[in-house]
Image: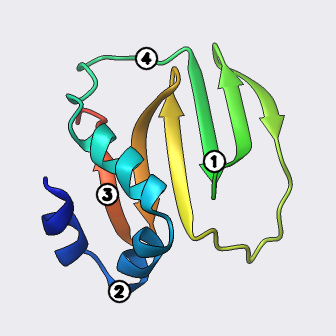
Amino acid sequence: MTTKRLTETVSLQTQNLLAEMPELLDTVTEAQQRPPLPLGYVPSVIEVLFEDVLYLKSVDGVLLLARECLADYQPRFVEYRFDDEMALFQVGRDVLVNRIAS
């Protein structure tokens, strides 16, 4: 998916965020070009970041970090990292990267 196509196929909210944060667009574009994770892949390290801040971290199935946040907190974007690689990236309802094999 090219950068132009990406910005044309997502919500206005996502377009605005990517315009504000061009480095984020670069990171997402790079992750989109990587192949899907293999079928049956089980990551050792799972991290969930809200707006680039680590909120959850699990290593070998053990939860090591769980940051508290308000129940109604709605991060502008969420990233799921498996073994230090972007596996899923979402802005609102727009899923920009999904490398998880189904």
Residue at 26%, 75% (x, y): give it: 10
Query: The C terminus appears in which quarter of the rendering?
Result: top left
Q: Which residue is mark 4?
A: 42
Q: Which residue is mark 2?
A: 12
Residues under numbered marks 4 and 3 in contact, where contact means CB atoms less than 8 Å apart: no
Tell me the crowding category of disc 3: few under 14, some 14 to 19, or many 20 or more residues within 10 angstroms, Cα based.
many
| Residue 72, picture quadrant | bottom right
Frontmost of labels 2 and 1 is: 2
Between the C-alphas of marks 2 and 1, the distance is 22 Å
Q: Percent x, y for residue 81?
A: 51, 34
Q: Is residue 92 visible?
A: no
Secondary element at tag 2: helix
Residues under numbered marks 1 and 4 in contact, where contact means CB atoms less than 8 Å apart: no
Q: Amino acid at mark 4?
A: Val
Answer with left or right where residue 20 lies relative to residue 36: right
| Residue 65, picture quadrant | top right
The disc, 2 or 3, on the residue closer to the chain's N-terminal end is: 2
Q: Which residue is mark 1?
A: 49
Answer with left or right where residue 73 lies relative to residue 11: right
Q: Which residue is mark 3?
A: 96
Tell me the crowding category of disc 4: few under 14, some 14 to 19, or many 20 or more residues within 10 angstroms, Cα based.
few
Residue at 16%, 67% (x, y): give it: 4
Task: Relative to 88, say whether 7 is above or below.
Answer: below
Task: Relative to 18, say whether 38 is above or below.
Answer: above
The disc, 1 or 4, on the residue closer to the chain's N-terminal end is: 4
Between the C-alphas of marks 4 and 3, the distance is 22 Å
Secondary element at tag 1: strand
Q: Amino acid at mark 3?
A: Leu
Task: Relative to 80, say whether 59 is above or below.
Answer: above
Q: What colour scheme does the image use?
A: rainbow
